[in-house]
Image: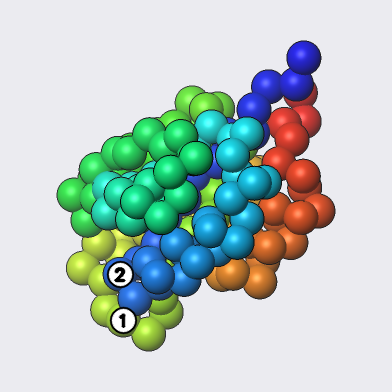
Amino acid sequence: MQQPFRLALIAHDQKKDDMVAFARAYESLLAPCTIVATGTTGRLIMESCPSLQITRVKSGPLGGDQQIGALIAEGLIDGLIFFVDPLSPMPHDVDVKALMRLGIVYDIPMALNRATAEVLVQKKGLLRAD
């Protein structure tokens, strides 16, 4: 039996509405996934997409990015969708870079904008490669 794809969802403040719209548009493809999201992003998606089962960690600036990074390092995340806002300053930029670095080191699919997230969801089919 195929294990659910374990997906992390994160969005910077100016991209949260985009993430919610993405989740709503792909709710049926995301539904079978095991989803982990940072605090506010997870709450907003849960309110908009009640069929999705989401485990929330702390807000990104309060350690949520690091929590998801630890899950990646432990092999508990299969893919990352992180809607990054490159135009806003981020006081926790170091954490964001560390998270992206872990995604690269552990060679998981990582989408940093909607266009790439759509390719990941549609082409990958959100299946684990066990």
**Label drawn at residue 13:** 2
Q: Position of residue 75 (x, y in %)?
A: 55, 27
Task: Give the residue type that dot 1 points to.
Answer: Ser
Q: Quadrant of residue 71?
A: top left
Residue drawn 63% across the image and 55% down it: 26
How many neighbours does mark 2 have within 10 angstroms: few (below 14), some (14-19), or many (20 or more)? some
Left or right position of 127 against 26: right
Instruction: Write down the residue under mark 1.
Output: 88
Residue 126 placement: quadrant: top right
Asked if residue 5 lies left or right of residue 77, the reply is right
x, y (%) of residue 116?
Answer: 67, 66
Residue 64, given in percent of the width and then of the height, sits at 29, 45
**Residue with the most extreme bottom position:** 87
Q: What is the CA distance from the residue labelled 1 to the residue labelled 2?
A: 9 Å
Quarter that holds the N terminus:
top right
Q: What element carries label 2?
A: helix
